[in-house]
Amino acid sequence: MTDDRRLLDVVAIDGPSGAGKSTVARAVARALGWTYVDTGAMYRAVGLKADREGVALDDDAGLDALCRVTRIEFREDGEGQNRIFLDGEDVSEAIREHRVSDLASRVSARKPVREAMGRYQRRLGERSPSVLEGRDIGTVIFPDARVKVFLTASAEERARRRTEELRRRGQEVAYERVLADIEARDRNDSSRAHAPLRPAEDAVVIDTTGLPVEEVVARIVGLVRGARGRPRP
């Protein structure tokens, strides 16, 4: 585990699909001048590769072998946006297709995948001051991080946001289908055997329903600055 001072430089932001993690985490990282790490994109990339290569999503041995030969990289483009590369291919758009959400949910429930991605996430978080967003950052990846936040929102609000996001990307999907998928993913994520979705005991829980992004970001930045100014109890 990283030393106590190093953990001042990790912000763990967890929460269910559509709670605003990516938008908020990216803005917090920008405000602090830190690295932004989208761990969900890693599972989407693995799910996409497994689907392309015909590896069954419940085949632990096959997924373990797949992860061992998979290279995932984050690179910043000329506009300061993160792009994700899978074995050298830019899959930033491909992993955001609606169907990939289910692939990601299913592979993320498999122990070999979570262990492989977890090791990579820790390396990224230890490399430089980082804001990591996902579903088990504060409970499994960096359980001793000084700042842990759990974002939530009603399923209806999350489905509305997700539907709007997909339509902005040119994907026409029905709100009702997105809502059903989100509710199913909530059940899968919270009931899986390995690293189920739940707030860390010492996480600050923020319900983002109806809250402006700027307000949520300001609160988290305040938590970070407060933590860096006080000793650990």
Image (cartoon, rainbow, N blue to C red):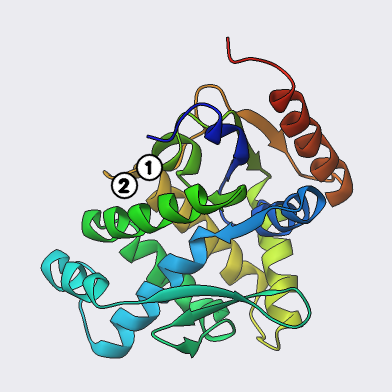
Counting from the top left corner in percent of width and height, residue 221 is at 78, 38
Q: Along the horizontal axis of the image, is 107 left or right of 23?
A: left
Q: Is residue 18 visible?
A: no
Where does the image place residue 75, in percent across and percent down from the top left?
59, 76
Query: Disc 2 vs disc 1: Cβ atoms closer than 8 Å?
Result: yes
- The type of residue carrying mark 1 is Pro
Residue drawn at 53 percent across, 86 percent down? 94
Quick one: quadrant of the C terminus? top right
* Quadrant of the snapshot with the N terminus: top left
Residue on which disc 1 sits: 196
Residue 216 x/y as whole percent:
80, 42
Residue 128 in the figure: left or right of residue 81: left
> Badge 1, how many Cα within 10 Å: few under 14, some, many 20+?
some
Q: On residue 192, which mark appears? A: 2
Coordinates of residue 82 in the picture (x, y in percent): 65, 73
Q: Residue furthest top?
A: 233
Residue at (26% x, 88% y) in the render:
53
Cα–Cα gap, marks 2 and 1:
5 Å
Residue pictured at 44% horizontal, 67% vertical: 42
Q: Residue at x 29, y 59 (%)?
A: 116
* 146, above or below 85, in the image: above
Residue 176, compared with residue 124, is above or below; it is below
Rendered image quadrant of residue 160: bottom right
Give neighbour class at mark 2: few <14, some 14-19, many 20+ (Cα, 10 Å): some
User: What kind of element bears circle 2?
Assistant: loop
Vertical comparison of 189 with 228: above or below = below
Q: Amino acid at mark 2?
A: Arg
User: Which image quadrant for residue 30?
Assistant: bottom right
Residue 223 visible at all: yes
Marker count (numbered): 2
Q: Secondary structure at mark 1?
A: loop
Of the pair 140 and 189, the residue shown nearer to us: 140
